[in-house]
Image (spheres, rainbow, N blue to C red):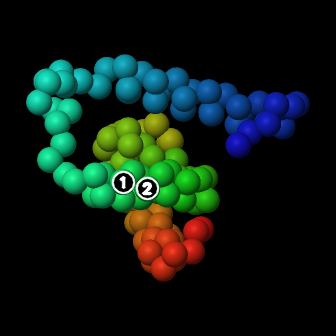
């Protein structure tokens, strides 16, 4: 995504580094749940598991095609399970901007999913 090279904007670099450190701190203090032996047992059929795995792979790939802010907010919300307020604070944007980015990302991914269902890869 970002290549090594001369720094174009020191202020931008510092903001990016501060954002990443903030996200690391939020992740470090998030509570975790202990897994039990029964948690790994799946009652779904192999076909359903295969479809779910394929959709998960497609979704990860499709997220990379979103605009940067939408992708960042979508991943933080759905994969990192951060609240809108936490994302807003980490990225220094308004909560409304976070909600808008999530909405637009979902709309974009939903449109791509229709293409995926029709057999065309994005």
Residue at left offset 58%, top offset 68%: 121
In the picture, the quarter occupied by the C terminus is bottom right
Q: Is residue 106 above or below residue 27?
A: below
Q: Is residue 34 above or below residue 91?
A: above
Q: Which residue is found at the position 38% from the left and 27% from the top?
A: 26
Q: Nearer the viewer, residue 57 or 104?
A: 57
- The quarter in which the N terminus is drawn is top right
Q: Secondary structure at mark 2?
A: helix
Q: Which residue is mark 1?
A: 50
Is residue 101 visible to us here?
no
Residue 57 seen: yes
x and y percent of residue 93 in the render? 49, 49
Residue 54 is labelled as 2
The tag on residue 110 is: none
Figure quadrant of residue 3? top right
CB-based contact (under 8 Å), mark 1 and mark 2: yes
Residue drawn at point x = 38 percent, y = 26 percent: 27
Callout 1 secondary element: helix
Q: Is residue 66 above or below residue 110?
A: above
Left or right: where does residue 91 sit relative to residue 38? right
Answer few, some or many: residues within 10 Å of disc 1's Cα (few below 14, many 20 plus, some between 14 and 19): few
The quarter holding residue 29 reads top left
Packing grade of label 2 (10 A; few <14, some 14-19, many >=20) is few
Mark 1 to mark 2 CA distance (whole Å): 6 Å
């Amino acid at each position: 995504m970002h290549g090594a090279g001369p720094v174009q904007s020191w202020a931008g670099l510092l903001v990016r580094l501060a954002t990443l450190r903030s996200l690391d701190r939020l992740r470090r203090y998030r509570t975790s749940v202990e897994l039990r032996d029964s948690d790994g047992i799946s009652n779904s059929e192999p076909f359903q598991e295969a479809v779910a795995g394929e959709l998960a792979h497609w979704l990860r790939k499709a997220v990379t095609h979103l605009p940067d802010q939408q992708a960042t907010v979508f991943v933080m919300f759905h994969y990192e399970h951060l609240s809108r307020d936490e994302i807003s604070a980490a990225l220094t944007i308004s909560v409304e901007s976070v909600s808008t980015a999530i909405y637009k990302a979902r709309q974009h991914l939903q449109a791509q999913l229709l293409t995926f269902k029709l057999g065309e890869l994005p």
